[in-house]
Amino acid sequence: MTHVRTLVLLASLSVLTVSTGAAQGPPQRITPYPGGETTQPTRGKNSFSLPAANLNRKDLRIFFFGNRLFNTNWVAAPASVKSLDGLGPTFNRVSCSGCHLRDGRGRPPGKIGEKFQSMLIRLSVPGQNKAGGPKPHPHYGDQLNDRAILSVPAEGFSSIETKEMKGSYADGMPYQLSAPLYRFTDLAYGPFGDDIMISPRVAPPVFGLGLLEAIKEEDILALADPDDQSGNGISGRVNTVWDQPTATKKIGRFGWKANSASLQHQNAAAAAGDIGLTSTLFPEANCPAIQENCLSQAALAKGVDLSDNFMAKLTFYTQTLAVPARRNVDSPDVLAGEELFNAIGCSSCHIPTFVTGRHPTVPALSNQTIHPFTDLLLHDMGEGLADNRPDFDATGREWRTPPLWGIGLTKAVNKHTRFLHDGRARSVEEAILWHGGEAEAAKEQFRLLPLEPRIQLLKFLNSL
């Protein structure tokens, strides 16, 4: 009887279904192996930390060395281990895993006054830098570093307060959303100024990224519809960004606003901004001119902190972290939820299936049928989620569609269920209810669903 009621509901929704215009025929059934041959079985809290299942023995040695680098706590120079010093002078965390715990998702502080642990604040002022990206704040750079080595002051501290917003489903069931308010204290170099633009960011999960890197550019471009010529209300756009390794403009794929085109660039930029590690790609320490102590400490450095060899191994690690297998794929509720996911328009942006092309450096990632549930495009998500901070071609209301694979394992791995770019959503359900802009229609169809189909849709998402 449950399945019959769901089929009737699907029939009533069919006239409202949103399509990308790219897929031909009915949606394909999603397999239990979202990473294709690279998929690994789930392993509880370690589900995001396994190597791609099809790596050879040589690649596994590189993977595990990269894993060591990812989890290394860097220290200030000079230190007894020269290859692992160079922290700071200002920074946010001492390791990659400090934000991406067990290669998973960060969260905002659990209570008022708690320090940020896996979250940071991006900063900029109106205008663009030389590469066409956000223009750094003249005193604080492009993110607020809340930690520093001895003799150098931290730049300042962030805290969050929340405002509860009430709503209700069409059946009368109430819900609450939590809107964050940000405060800044102990700013070491004066107030930000009235023209400051901030963007809070929690650390995204890092598994499956090499597969996203292997998606063919033409497949991403085929999904873009910047002028909404299809008339479906969805106008996904690519973000064209500066790629430091190739010194060219490319299509962005990584980051909350798709502001990095390659994992090598993403990793080098994070090493510099989050840990204060210089590299061949980013050889200058993150010290604005006013930060004299920071500059004097940076001047003592000899060479770059993160060698090309270490950078290559770290990048390989982030390219080859496996996507975990799905669970409960044959459950009637999960199957019904999958139909609803397509019927109410979620799959218009969260594209279920791609076939990867030839990865230039990791053959194991090539020619894989994958289910990431993203189009890697920018979408206007409405005023409620806007950070009002442009990033290359991305406006202050646009965000890249985040992949959904592995989302149902977040609690098992990271002991929380905080979602969206700033972690404001306390559950997958709340994340859906925050959708606006181009996703308003799909969100509203979810809100109109009776309780039973809503639960089915959530069970499908938690099976990913």
Image: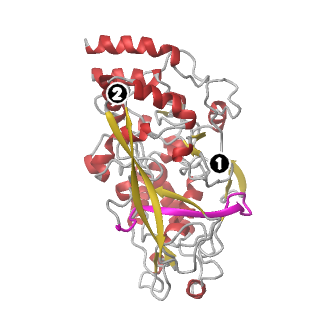
Question: Which x, y percent locates residue 360?
Answer: 60, 46
Residue 275 appears at what percent x and percent y?
49, 70
Circle nearer the N terminus (2, 1): 1
| Residue at image mark 1 | 395
The answer to whether residue 33 shows anywhere in this view is: yes
At 46% from the left and 20% from the top, the residue drawn is 343
Q: Give 417 or 212, whichever is nearer the viewer.
A: 417
- Quadrant housing the N terminus: top left
Q: Is residue 30 visible?
A: no
Name the image quarter holding the C terminus.
top left
Considering only vertical position in the picture, is 138 above or below 213? below
Q: Which mark is residue 454?
A: 2
Residue 292 falls in image quadrant: bottom right
Magenta stretch? 113-134
Residue 449 position in % (x across, y down):
38, 23
Amino acid carrying mark 2 in the image: Arg
The crowding category of the residue bearing disc 2, from other C-alpha atoms within 10 Å (few below 14, some 14 to 19, many at least 20), is some
